[in-house]
Amino acid sequence: MLKFYCRRNNLLVLLLLFCFNQSFSQTGNIADQIVGVVGNNIVLKSEVESQYAQLIAQGTPDAENLRCKILDQLLLNKLLLHQANIDSLNVEESQVNQKIESNLSYFIQQIGSVEKLEQYYGKSVAELKEEFKPLIREQLLAQQMQSKITKGLSSSPSDVRSFFNKIPKDSRSEEHTSELQSHSDLVCRLLLEKK
């Protein structure tokens, strides 16, 4: 009797595994992709696409390397966020709430009314506040870290010109600069198009 019970359970487990495997192999859809990692922070392809869609909706011209610029900015923000966590920086809840209220006021002003905003996003203002909270917290931490890094630094146009003129002319040719940029763009495009 025990032998029959074990055999029946094994058969049931195999049947469930087969069904589970078939359901995933039939869809073939990928929920999301990781396109960058900084410390414990990841950048998802959906984040890049979301920001890209927002910029296009705001009227930003669709440049060839717009997604790459977005990825660069997201990676920089994740780097600042990672360093902020290492340095144990924190943001007060009141700062987060104040920034959320400021952003929502701006969005409402742009779209016309609270009702139109809720209709546009398909969510209530309370749901939007909860959704924005971790994003705003990260943004404020990254800004705080950037301020900490750049505190006391200043440069004038003459400082930049002086620095540039110290670089040997053969090291700053346009050919090398554009070649480096095209390699960087290629790597970025490959990361974003990876399936």
Image (cartoon, rainbow, N blue to C red):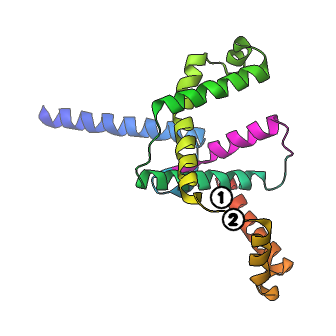
Q: Which residue is mark 1?
A: 191
Between 20 and 95, the residue placed more toward the observer is 95
Q: Amino acid at mark 1?
A: Leu
Q: Quadrant of residue 55?
A: top right
Residue 4 % position (x, y): 19, 34
Q: Amino acid at mark 2?
A: Val
Between 136 and 36, the residue placed more toward the observer is 136
Q: Is residue 114 above or below residue 22?
A: above
Circle 1 packing at 10 Å, graded few (<14), some (14-19), many (20+), is some
Check whether the beta carbons of the residues at disc 2 and disc 1 lie within 8 A of each other.
yes
Q: Quadrant of residue 193?
A: bottom right
SS of the residue under disc 1: helix
Q: Residue at x 72, y 67 (%)?
A: 184
Q: Which residues, given as a range, are shown in magenta? A: 42-61
Q: Quadrant of residue 80?
A: bottom right
**Hey, which residue is sitting farthest top in the picture?**
115
- What mark, if any, has residue 106 been given in the picture? none
Residue 140 % position (x, y): 55, 41
Residue 39 % position (x, y): 46, 57
Q: Which residue is mark 2?
A: 187
